[in-house]
Image: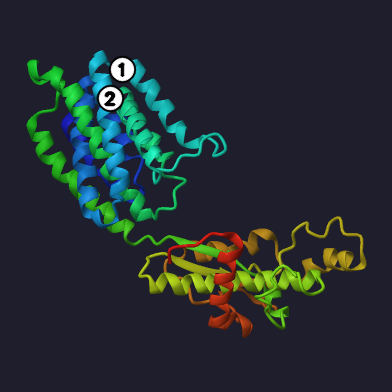
């Protein structure tokens, strides 16, 4: 039964990685380590993952960030040469210990470690570290994840670039652990017919995963409010009330109008750039949070005891955000929110917005002013 199990693992893990860009290699290594001698598991894993990752990189080659690949490959070669020079021989106990520890790397707090594969030095660090971890534990994907989870790359760019980098780690694994097996009859390796079936199925799993990936669109959901309608004018040249008296309620309404205009301008720019990303503007209606619990003013007391009569619990208020983030056919050109009692509660649906929120000239001016104030410019 070993052969058929390996074949099923090859397809399923390639499919998983094709969607997420991670996790498949870890699952495959764990399964192979239970079925095969350790060195044979390393080599078999290297062959199957080389095919899956290489094919994934080819399928999504237009998204590969080649500057990252060049730096990664150089450092990967150095790590492989170092491990080969010390003659490391993995044990099953150490392998399973490392398989349990390596995934924890991705949960390191961001304040502890700030890595970004887009930076040349970090890409080289990734090549050395990930290839080294891969040669010790059989998998390096979770270690590679910490270099990508904090980048500004899109989902497609991450999947494609990670796949291309992993090619070098798997080649190193095959070379380092495959050489000693050349003088041993099969060395515990699966028979040739297993690879003859598993390799094309691994490629098929990659294609199937890519098919699913192409139908998953990343989304940006920006929360506005029905209070945005209280803004009679949008002072784009005085967003911080530097040239007019500050009014708390008006400032809140203006900020929510700005959120909605940002969402719409981002969507316009994404469509113009041909990006698969989508931007949504939503509002939660009236949510009965604890915002006014400590407000002893008349307004605070009225809000505290009156809002529950017209509003809804925070859990229901979150439904519009979840709707925009998850419903496959949600239209990004629609302003989503509760639809009953003047949009304060009820089921999620299309909602009206004020005239200012539809002024594309204001969208662009707000975007440009935001870039000036923050010093951040998005390439869309």
Position of 241 with respect to 201 (left or right) is: right
Res 48 quadrant in image: top left
**Residue 217, position in %: x, y?**
40, 62
Res 9 quadrant in image: top left
Q: Write the residue at 32% across / 26% down.
A: 132
Q: Is residue 1 visible?
A: no
Q: Is residue 4 visible?
A: yes
User: Which is more N-terminal, label 2 or label 1?
Assistant: 2
Kindly check if marks 1 and 2 are in contact, taking CB atoms under 8 A apart as contact. Answer: yes
Res 341 quadrant in image: bottom right
Q: Which residue is mark 2?
A: 33
Q: Quadrant of the N terminus?
A: top left
**Residue 172, position in %: x, y?**
22, 29
In the depicted structure, whether residue 179 falls above or below residue 102: above
Mark 1 to mark 2: distance in Å? 7 Å
Q: Write the residue at 22% across / 28% down.
A: 173
Q: Residues within 10 Å of mark 2 (few under 14, many from 20)?
A: many
Position of 338 with respect to 36 (left or right) is: right
Mark 2 secondary-structure assignment: helix
Q: Residues within 10 Å of mark 1 (few under 14, many from 20)?
A: some
Q: Which residue is mark 1?
A: 92
**Viewer-closest of 102 and 160:** 160
């Amino acid at each position: 039964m070993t052969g058929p199990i390996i074949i099923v693992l090859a397809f399923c893990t390639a499919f998983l990685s094709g969607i997420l860009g991670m996790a498949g290699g870890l699952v495959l290594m764990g399964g192979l380590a239970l079925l095969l001698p350790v060195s044979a598991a390393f080599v078999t894993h290297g062959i199957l993952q080389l095919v899956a990752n290489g094919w994934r990189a080819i399928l999504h080659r237009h998204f590969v960030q080649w500057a990252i690949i060049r730096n990664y490959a150089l450092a990967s070669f150095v790590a492989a040469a170092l491990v080969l020079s010390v003659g490391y021989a993995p044990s099953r106990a150490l392998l399973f210990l490392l398989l349990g520890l390596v995934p924890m790397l991705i949960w390191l707090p961001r304040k502890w470690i700030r890595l970004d594969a887009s930076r040349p030095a970090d890409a080289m660090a990734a090549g050395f570290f990930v290839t080294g971890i891969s040669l010790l534990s059989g998998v390096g994907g979770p270690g590679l994840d910490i270099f990508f989870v904090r980048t500004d790359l899109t989902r497609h760019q991450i999947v494609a670039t990670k796949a291309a980098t992993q090619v070098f780690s798997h080649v190193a694994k095959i070379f380092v652990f495959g050489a000693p097996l050349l003088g041993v009859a099969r060395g515990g390796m699966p028979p040739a017919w297993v690879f003859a079936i598993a390799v094309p199925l691994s490629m098929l799993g990659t294609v199937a995963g890519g098919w699913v990936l192409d139908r998953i669109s990343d989304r940006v959901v920006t929360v506005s409010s029905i209070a945005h309608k209280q803004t009679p004018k949008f002072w784009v040249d005085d967003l911080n009330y530097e040239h007019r008296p500050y009014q708390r309620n008006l400032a809140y309404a203006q900020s929510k109008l700005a959120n909605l205009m940002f969402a719409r301008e981002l969507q316009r720019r994404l469509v113009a750039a041909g990006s698969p990303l989508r931007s949504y503007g939503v509002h939660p209606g009236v949510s009965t949070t604890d915002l006014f619990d400590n407000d002893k003013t008349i307004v605070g007391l009225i809000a505290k005891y009156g809002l529950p009569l017209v509003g809804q619990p925070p859990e229901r208020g979150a439904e519009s955000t979840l709707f925009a983030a998850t419903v496959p056919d949600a239209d990004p050109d629609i302003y989503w929110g509760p639809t009953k009692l003047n949009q304060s509660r009820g089921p999620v649906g299309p909602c009206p917005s004020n005239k200012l929120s539809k002024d594309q000239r204001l969208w662009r001016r707000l975007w440009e002013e935001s870039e000036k104030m923050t010093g951040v410019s998005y390439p869309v």
